[in-house]
Amino acid sequence: MYVVWVPCYVPFVIPNVYHHNPQRPYIRLYPEVDEDMFVQSASEMETLMNDARKVVGKISSSHDFANDVMGAAQESDQSKVNTLIRSTGVESPFQADYNPDRMKIHLTARNQQVECCQLTIVLRWRVQ
């Protein structure tokens, strides 16, 4: 006999499961799998990745845009930074943080009023 501890569940004693015993049915230790939320989160993640691709693509293809974003960040003009990022076509909620070394853009998605997935982009603009 083995004592099994499963997080969030009351521990119980089960017979030795390494030997098949036809008289005792298989005892499931975890709840049934419901992949719906997992699949929906993956779908929302595709949206976040497309938004990230838009921002990164615009920065990598336009020196003027990159200069504008860095300048607004250097001046701590959060509303201008947000406006510039939004102008790339990003539709997901995001938060842009920056310091003298890098910019971090944190994208989030909600599914059924639950935050289901997150994507964080970190782009450096200065070597220490």
Image (cartoon, rainbow, N blue to C red):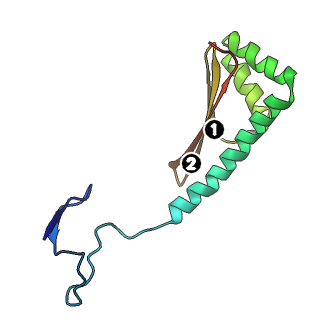
Q: What residue type is labelled 2?
A: Arg
Question: Is the Cβ of the residue at disc 2 closer than 8 Å to that at disc 1?
Answer: yes
Quadrant assignment, res 75: top right
**Secondary structure type for disc 1:** loop
- Relative horizontal placement of residue 97, taking residue 2 as reference (left or right): right
- Relative horizontal placement of residue 31, taking residue 61 as reference (left or right): left
Between discs 2 and 1, the one toward the N terminus: 1
Q: Name the residue under label 2.
A: 110
In the depicted structure, whether residue 118 falls above or below residue 3: above
In the depicted structure, whether residue 72 falls above or below residue 59: above
- What crowding class fits label 1: few (fewer than 14 Cα within 10 Å), some (14-19), or many (20 or more)? few
In the depicted structure, whether residue 113 falls above or below residue 33: above
Quadrant assignment, res 3: bottom left
Q: Which residue is drawn at 46% across and 68% down?
A: 34
Q: Where is residue 16 in the image (x, y as percent from the top left)?
A: 18, 74
Q: Which residue is drawn at 75% across and 32% down?
A: 86
**Secondary structure type for disc 2:** strand
Q: Which residue lies furthest to the bottom in this view?
A: 23
Q: Name the residue under label 1.
A: 93
CA gap, disc 2 to disc 1? 9 Å
Q: Residue at x 80, y 22 (%)?
A: 66
Q: Which amino acid does label 1 sit on?
A: Pro
Quadrant showing the C terminus? top right
